Amino acid sequence: MLDQISRDDGTALLCGAGLGVEEASQWLEEAQTRVFGNSELSTEARDCGRLCQTARAWLEGLPLKSERDQKQEQAGSLLVRETAGLCWRFTRTWRKELFEESERIAGSFPRLEALAESASELCPGIYPCEQELQVEQKKLLRDKDGLELHQGILFAQWFSDPEHGQRMIRNMRQPTPRALELQEEVLKTGKANLEYARVEIENGTGTVFFSNPMYLNAEDDTTLEPSETAVDLVLLHPEVKVGVLRGDPVSHPKYSGRRLFSSGINLTRLYQGTQSYLFYLTRELGLVNKLFRGHCGAEWLGEEIEHGHEIPWIAVVEGFAIGGGCQLLLVMDYVLAESGAYLNLPARKEGIIPGCANLRLPRMTGKRLASQAILFDRQFPVDAPESQSLVNEICSRNDVERQLRQCLQSVTGSGLVSAAGNRKSLRAGEEPLEVFRTYMAQYAYEQAFCHLSPQLVQNLEFHWKSRESKNQKMPI
């Protein structure tokens, strides 16, 4: 999967960064020739972990990544690439046993973060533990040496296995523990304030408000759990027949007091290095997939026909739906937008993959328009003809409330007897679970490298610094 450099060239690069010829040559030979599957998991995990830890110690001995000279930069890149290749071969050999043991340690229906931590306990040095990741988060993105790449390799291998991939999808469709704790309170009051998200239940409608006002309702590690929990609370309420996604008013000076849908991933946190890789996977399997597929029962095996509880969702787009906000529209059943709003997917310009938009956007707009949006940053003004496949209804800003009420009355008044069945049947033809699982395997791998790529850093440097010079926070 990852090409290896010749032994002599690699040794020369490592020596150029201050390592001795003998230790550099010996490490490189062992890292490149190590074969797995001839012993026990614990033994091979120990040997592989030792090689990875040696490489990380050497990386820590170098200056910060952004301060390295050419020789140090080449040596650092070599160490990251060789340990990633080593991790790939180890994980590919032991993925079945790794998953089963990690799941056993993590307990019933473990979420992705619990599986990742269990794997780090089983294989210290190979997969990063939470403590190591917290230390890594103190570095700017440009100074990170790829610790999270090994998480991407791990989950890519797990998603590549049909059984394990479907188990992860199933487990992430369970309500969050916090949602179960708050369920009774919401049943009594019809409300929940989760700091970065709000829930209001009224007349059979459950509304989830995104609430990150200083960052134009951007998404990041701090908002993800509240947003997913809010969706859970709507799905758990027995009287709710339809869900609504909407943004709260923001406090950013440019849009102060206006409702905005979402500005996508918080690039300030991304640039500062505090945004985690697991955010991307957790978001797709938790928040987004619950909107798309709802909750599933604990006994559902994953490879069976879909069953579980779900409701139709309506999105209200005010201002814009950028990046992740636009991705959410692709799993909505109805989109109401104010005139003048726009949608776009600037992930290519940022240097990352826009979630599952690559899977879902082409079937809505056609491949040509989807490619323009994803690869060439094409915007979709909601009033333009090409946006008709993404937006159901457009109205003036002053009419949004009235149009939303009419839409809800129309939907709830029809009884919704077959809404869930029709949603499942539509998905069976357009995005079977196996298609989703296969996509997630590729996405987990590619996004790990994109998340830590020099191109992403360069793009963020350009955009973040240009906005910083204007004394603006960078929300999108």
Image: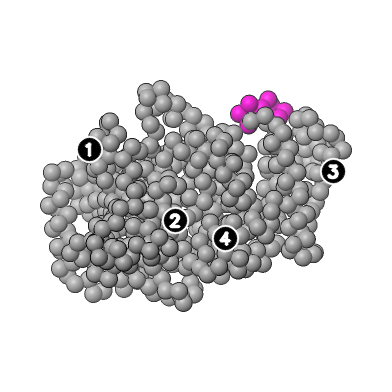
In depth, the one of 247 and 189 nearer the eye is 189
Q: SS at mark 1?
A: loop
Q: Secondary structure at mark 4?
A: helix
How far separated are the C-alphas under marks 1 and 3?
62 Å
Residue 109 spot, x, y in % from top left:
50, 68
Q: Earlier in the sequence, mark 1 or mark 3?
A: 3
Q: Tell me the residue that label 4 is attached to.
A: 115
Distance, label 1 to label 2, CA atoms, is: 30 Å
Amino acid type, label 1: Gly
Front position among marks 1 and 2: 1
Span shown in magenta: 65-72
x 52%, y 59%: residue: 112
The secondary element bearing badge 2 is classed as helix
Circle 1 residue: 257
Q: Residues within 10 Å of mark 2 (few under 14, many from 20)?
A: many
Q: Amino acid at mark 2?
A: Glu
* Three-letter amino acid code of the residue under disc 4: Leu
Marks 4 and 3 sit apart, C-alpha to C-alpha, by 33 Å
Residue that badge 3 annotates: 26
Total tally of numbered discs in the picture? 4
Q: Are marks 1 and 3 in contact (CB under 8 Å)?
A: no
